[in-house]
Image (spheres, helix red, strand yellow):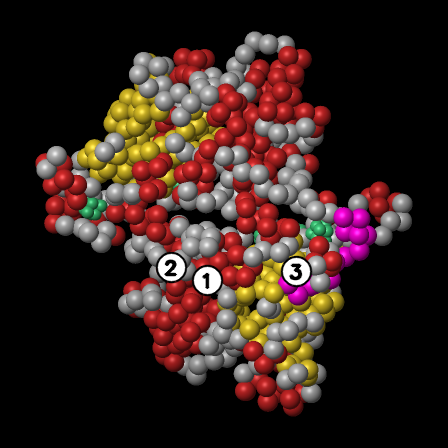
């Protein structure tokens, strides 16, 4: 359990697990072996303080996208609950329908179709790929109008057009009239990502999962999109779960950081704390590995304090899942999963090393 | 005499919709054992430059003008047969962008390296296999895995295999095009270490092509900044990082997020040019905060400022003043 004060949160998930079952191979069928699972998310607590940027950082395949999608209801978690503090309008409906409550939050893990559809408006996602995520055969206007039509918003086409124009202006695609009839291929990468953001916000999003929103853009324009996202957060009281594999970006834009390894969050806390004072051996290794723009680095072979390679999410090591790669692994690490230890203000690390030090 | 000297190289793509001037009047030198980074944004012509150096520019592209002088021989003048026999892979090799995903999935990695050797040298299959195992060892892969298939390897290991293939004929120069782009930071650091070791132990020259300035600092002795098909600044790594001169280099330098650095977001407004119709004058002028009248009409020449070569009109006065 966390010391986060619940009143500061807008959404949180506890004990989350998302398992994907793999098709059984022929030998497995013939030998009556049980089917295997990909444990993409394997026991995670995640907290999103309202109007803050919370980052989820980790290597490819560690479960970031799966976790992000699950907390906004796009994937049903195998285990665990997700709690959300909705808008007034939705709250009334949830109250009426008797959605279970805890500490002033509504449990949105299983909700009826009607509430689910309203939740979709408030919990949104921006995808990594500004190329693949927009339908190439639709104009910008059609792309932005689509969610309005699906959700039955806007009385007339004119009214919807007005909303589309407002959305384009909000993401600084101006003058908006010039963009309405363009197709995605006529836009630059940065402009496409703006359209993506406009689409996520047009229904009045409250929480946005931003899944690597700038990693495919050129370095010289990334910051412009990040700044836009931060401004929108301020102006519209948004809350972000910002997914990235880039610790340097995370260190600049995030208020809180979560370090994920093989389906688990191994360290979390306020960004500066985690970056300047990393406690978990995995976080420490990641930080050493980040390339530094200092030409003196070319004279040294950089020893990253980590062994081997990331195991598959199908065969997660027992005990501490990091133990085969950890330079500090002890006996207990091979047998028992470490709990989260409080190692600083709001700063947690799941590692047995902190046990003695208590 | 430098190992490699590129002079006034122009590589254009002749497409139905117009001529793309992907590499436009590029010059630089590379010494033996030196590492040069070519840094630029997507579409600035980095890969095309690499293809040009090993004479593998894909159609509708071709080398239009310029010289590529390797040890005194101009490669642009050699017939393809001689390039294939004497130069490509033997003197200059290239690790292609995304090559790790282009390994043949149904062929053992060892055999893929063996094929690369046999295609160019008359050795027995056994000897080639022996070499393949030594190469795997050199790139940090257990040689006993020579019979594995690519899918049994992680992304980092596949990239090592691709590097091993580029080393197979012991070239003087290896061009590595975005060798770590799709890899995680830990693996990225390991691949960089590998390239550093190869450079030190084999006195190999490396041309690193990348968009990532942080990465460059970890490897390059010399840096060339590419913008819209042109090199806008070339200098030693120390000069470029401590005292960038060209406004684009400055902007790029300020745009890289730094761990533990200032929490400021900086970017260069606007977008890189369309190389089919690049802006007249200095190609950076639509995005440049210092643009002057002359920048919009006349292309800046190179100025030599204390060993750094920079193409920008801002240095006009300084030159005449000495
Ligand atoms: N629909 C699915 N079916 C089976 N396995 C899946 C599915 N989606 C994801 N996985 C697996 O779950 C694990 C976590 O994947 P996920 O996409 O969440 O990782 P990620 O951290 O977002 O990675 P990346 O940085 O590459 O985007 C991976 O092993 C992946 O192969
Ligand atoms: N086969 C081709 N036909 C026509 N134009 C091409 C071809 N290949 C590349 N180009 C164009 O040439 C220019 C330079 O491309 P190139 O791939 O060399 O850039 P790059 O700097 O390597 O980019 P990236 O960082 O995305 O790899 C681009 O404008 C590109 O669209
Ligand atoms: S619990 Fe043990 S193996 Fe895991 S990170 Fe800590 S010391 Fe390493
Ligand atoms: S030549 Fe002019 S436009 Fe180009 S970089 Fe220099 S000042 Fe800017
Ligand atoms: Mg992902
Ligand atoms: Mg390229």
Q: Secondary structure at mark 2?
A: loop
Q: Nearer the viewer, residue B93 or A249?
A: A249
For the image shown, how many numbered marks are present on the structure? 3
Q: Chain of mark 1?
A: A
Q: Is residue B45 left or right of residue A111?
A: left
Q: Furthest residue to the front?
A: A357
Residue A239 image position (x, y, % from top left): 51, 72
Q: Which mark is residue B265?
A: 2
Q: Which residue is mark 1?
A: A253
Q: Are marks 2 and 3 on the same chain?
A: no
B214 relative to B32, above or below: below
Residue positioned 59% across, 86% down in the render? A91
Which is nearer the N-term, disc 1 or disc 3? 1
Spatial distance from mark 2 to mark 3, Cα to Cα? 29 Å
Residue positioned 63% across, 25% down in the render? B137
Q: Which residue is mark 3?
A: A349
Is A337 part of what is drawn in magenta? yes
């Amino acid at each position: 359990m966390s010391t986060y004060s619940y009143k500061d949160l807008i959404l949180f998930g506890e004990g989350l697990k998302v398992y994907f079952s793999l098709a059984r191979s022929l030998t497995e069928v013939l030998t009556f072996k049980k089917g295997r699972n990909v444990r993409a998310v394997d026991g995670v607590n995640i907290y999103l303080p309202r109007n803050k940027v919370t980052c989820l950082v980790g290597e490819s395949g560690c479960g970031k996208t799966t976790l992000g999608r699950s907390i906004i209801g796009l994937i049903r978690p195998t285990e665990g609950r997700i709690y959300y503090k909705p808008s007034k309008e939705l709250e009334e409906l949830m109250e009426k329908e008797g959605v279970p409550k805890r500490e002033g939050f509504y449990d949105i893990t299983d909700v009826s179709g009607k509430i689910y559809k309203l939740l979709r408006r408030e919990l949104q996602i921006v995808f990594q790929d500004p190329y693949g995520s927009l339908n190439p055969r639709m104009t910008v206007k059609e792309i932005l109008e689509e969610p309005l039509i699906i959700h039955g918003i806007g009385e007339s086409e004119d009214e919807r057009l007005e909303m589309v124009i407002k959305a384009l202006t909000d993401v600084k695609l101006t003058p908006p009239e010039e963009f309405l009839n363009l197709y995605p291929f006529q836009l630059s990468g940065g402009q496409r990502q703006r359209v993506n953001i406009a689409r996520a916000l047009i229904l009045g999003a409250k929480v946005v999962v931003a899944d690597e929103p700038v990693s495919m853009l050129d370095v010289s324009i990334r910051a412009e999109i990040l700044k836009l996202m931060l401004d929108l957060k301020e102006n519209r009281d948004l809350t972000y779960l910002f997914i990235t594999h880039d610790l340097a970006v995370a260190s600049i834009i995030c208020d809180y950081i979560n370090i994920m390894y093989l389906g688990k969050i191994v360290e979390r806390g306020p960004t500066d704390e985690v970056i300047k004072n990393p406690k978990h051996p995995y976080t420490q290794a990641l930080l050493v590995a980040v390339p530094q723009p200092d030409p003196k680095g070319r004279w040294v072979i950089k020893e990253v304090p980590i062994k081997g390679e990331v195991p598959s999410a199908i065969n997660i090591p027992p005990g501490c899942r990091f133990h085969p790669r950890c330079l500090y692994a002890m006996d207990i690490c091979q047998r028992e999963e470490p709990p989260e230890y409080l190692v600083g203000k709001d700063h947690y690390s799941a590692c047995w090393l902190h046990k003695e030090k208590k | 005499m430098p190992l490699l000297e590129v002079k006034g190289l122009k590589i254009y793509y002749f497409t139905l919709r117009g001529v793309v001037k992907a590499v436009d009047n590029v010059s630089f030198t590379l010494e033996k054992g030196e590492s040069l980074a070519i840094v630029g944004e997507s579409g600035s012509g980095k890969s095309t430059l690499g293809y040009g150096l090993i004479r593998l520019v894909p159609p509708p592209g071709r080398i239009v003008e310029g010289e590529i002088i390797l040890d005194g021989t101009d490669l642009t003048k050699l017939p393809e047969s001689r390039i294939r026999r004497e130069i490509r892979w033997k003197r200059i090799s290239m690790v292609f962008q995304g090559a790790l995903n282009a390994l043949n999935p149904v062929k053992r990695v060892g055999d893929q390296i063996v094929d690369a050797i046999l295609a160019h040298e008359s050795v027995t299959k056994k000897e080639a296999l022996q070499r393949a195992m030594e190469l795997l060892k050199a790139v940090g892969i257990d040689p006993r895995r020579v019979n594995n298939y690519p899918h049994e390897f992680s992304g980092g290991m596949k990239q090592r295999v691709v590097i091993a293939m580029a080393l197979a004929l012991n070239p003087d120069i290896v061009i590595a095009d975005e060798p770590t782009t799709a890899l995680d930071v830990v693996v990225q650091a390991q691949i960089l270490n590998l390239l550093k070791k190869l450079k030190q132990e084999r006195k190999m020259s490396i041309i690193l092509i990348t968009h990532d300035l942080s990465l460059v600092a970890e490897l390059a002795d010399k840096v060339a900044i590419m913008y819209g098909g042109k090199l806008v600044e070339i200098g030693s790594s120390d000069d470029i990082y401590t005292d960038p001169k060209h406004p684009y280099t400055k902007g790029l330098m300020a745009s890289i997020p730094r761990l533990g650095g200032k929490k400021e977001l900086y970017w260069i407004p606007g977008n890189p040019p369309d190389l089919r119709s690049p802006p007249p004058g200095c190609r950076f002028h639509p995005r440049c905060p210092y643009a002057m009248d002359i920048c919009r009409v006349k292309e800046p020449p190179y100025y030599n400022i204390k060993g750094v070569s920079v193409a920008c009109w801002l240095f006009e006065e300084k030159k005449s003043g000495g």
